Image (cartoon, rainbow, N blue to C red):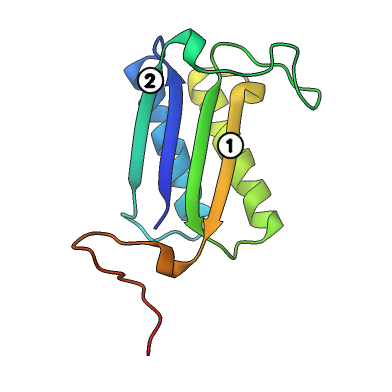
Amino acid sequence: MPLVRIDLNKTASAERARVVSEAVYKAMVEVASVPLHDKFQVITRHETEEIIYPAEGYLGLTYSPDIVIIQVTWVAGRSTDVKQRFYRMIADEIHEKQGVRKEDIFITLVDNGREDWSFGSGNMQYAPKQ
């Protein structure tokens, strides 16, 4: 049930957007045990000045206008090990297929509960059993 938001520079190619999308989905299924076909993603392109990052770097990393920001909202409960392997697989895949520097692949996870989702019709499909 993850919802993935991918933010890219407007200059990024359609192929780059596709590769990022597929890398995230592949890692969700193979590493994070997300069910097959559970693919909800929003890809947004921005003007260069609309993606703000520390030009002087942060935590020993430096960024470029090629930065890709990925936010995944999903149900809490995955281990630190799973999350680390998830990050690594995405960065490796995007770097390998598109040449994006791994430093430019910024990923954040938002954990929430099953009751925080409605997949349509105004229903809480994963409501707690009464």
Distance CA(mark 1)–CA(mark 2): 16 Å
- Mark 1, Cα crowd under 10 Å, few <14 / some 14-19 / many 20+, is some
Q: Residues within 10 Å of mark 2 (few under 14, many from 20)?
A: some
Q: Residue at x 48, y 50 (%)?
A: 73
The C terminus, quarter of image: bottom left
On screen, residue 84 above or below 61: below
Q: Are marks 1 and 2 in contact (CB under 8 Å)?
A: no
| Residue 89 vertical position relative to residue 112 in the rendered view, above or below | above
The three-letter code of the residue at mark 2 reads Arg
Residue 3 screen position, x and y as percent: 40, 48
> Residue at the left extreme?
121
> What number of labels is visible?
2
Lower position in the chain sequence, tag 1 or tag 2: 2
Give the number of the disc on residue 27.
none
Label 1, on which residue?
107
At 58% from the left and 37% from the top, the residue drawn is 107
Q: Amino acid at mark 1?
A: Ile
Residue at 36% across, 72% down: 126
Residue under label 2: 45
Residue at disc 2, secondary structure: strand
Residue in the foreground of this view, choosing between 25 and 118: 118
Q: Secondary structure at mark 1?
A: strand
